[in-house]
Image (tube, grey):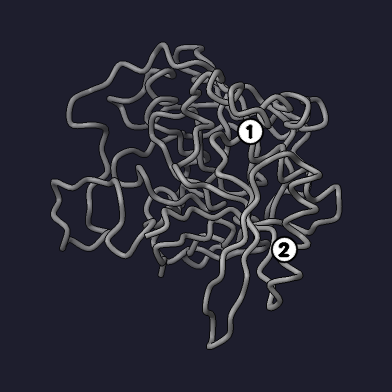
Amino acid sequence: MYKKISTLGAACTLAMLSACTTVPLSPKGQGGDKSAGDNVPFDQVRDSGPAVPVDMMATPEVTPVREPIGVAGNKSPYVVNGVRYRILQGVKGYREKGQASWYGTKFHGRKTANGEVYNMYAMSAAHKTLPLPSYAKVTNLDNGRSVIVRVNDRGPFVPGRIIDLSYTAAQKLGYIDKGVARVVVEALDPESLPSASETLAVEKDAAARQALPQDASFKLPAHTYLQVGAYSSSSQAEEVRTQLAAAFGYPVSVSPVESGGKSLYRVRIGPIAQQRALVSLRESIEKKSFGQPQVVVDDGN
């Protein structure tokens, strides 16, 4: 399904379901529980934490920012196992009690429903109806612990469960060993949050990028780009490249590719190191009427 160049803007397939909807980055997949064997069907691979438990209690909380709601992962309605789900149009006031589960090695390194890459060591979560991305406060009702997570995936599609947390978030809430916990989930109103562009304007500068803390929730895979478009004319692509470079101060490249027997010229900005920088840049591109760029990972091989 996925080529060496992985287009992250496409919505995640709902056919490969367990606790969430993450899918492989390549035909063989990356991450996951390798001890199960490469020939074991994905739905038969058992999920777990790392082979040697890792203490993630000191992991920093995410810094919630106002992010644009994209197309990827937000198809509404959608159907899983015969159940129809509708994405919430607004999250202000959303509060729900239920069971939380967590997901780990089986999905680690695979695409999330909104096209990012699942990192079980990040402070993230999967939810069935919150827009992607969203931020939520999750409180363990048995011990009173709370965390803030960034919702970037779909699930859990198990009766009674309302949210699926990353390995780290579940550890901080104290239910790794139990597997599930009684929680209350409260969405953060995006209108009350600062925009990504306000918090990471400094990311344009290469030296400043190196100085940014490597918050696991926002570190992107190597060779991550925003693809603004693919043009049939090389001169048109070069014109767009010039405009983008002048407007945003990021590296912009034009690369040719054959598609359906025709030559196309892709215009890409990057590479981009961190998720919040990507969100900020995508927000700025859309505001300046350059369209809705797609996130791609391209190692050049």
Question: Pointer 2: what residue?
Answer: 238
Which residue sits at x=51%, y=67%? 82
> Percent position (x, y) of residue 78?
60, 64
Q: Is residue 229 left or right of residue 216?
A: right
Q: Earlier in the sequence, mark 2 or mark 1?
A: 2
Q: Is residue 298 left or right of residue 27?
A: right
Circle number at residue 173: none
Q: Is residue 184 above or below residue 84?
A: above
Q: Amino acid at mark 1?
A: Arg
Inter-mark Cα distance, 2 to 1: 27 Å
Question: Pointer 1: what residue?
Answer: 276
> Percent position (x, y) of residue 178?
30, 27
Q: Amino acid at mark 2?
A: Glu
Dot 1: element = helix
> Percent position (x, y) of residue 261?
53, 88
Residue, far right: 288
> Which quarter shows the N terminus?
bottom left
Dot 2: element = helix
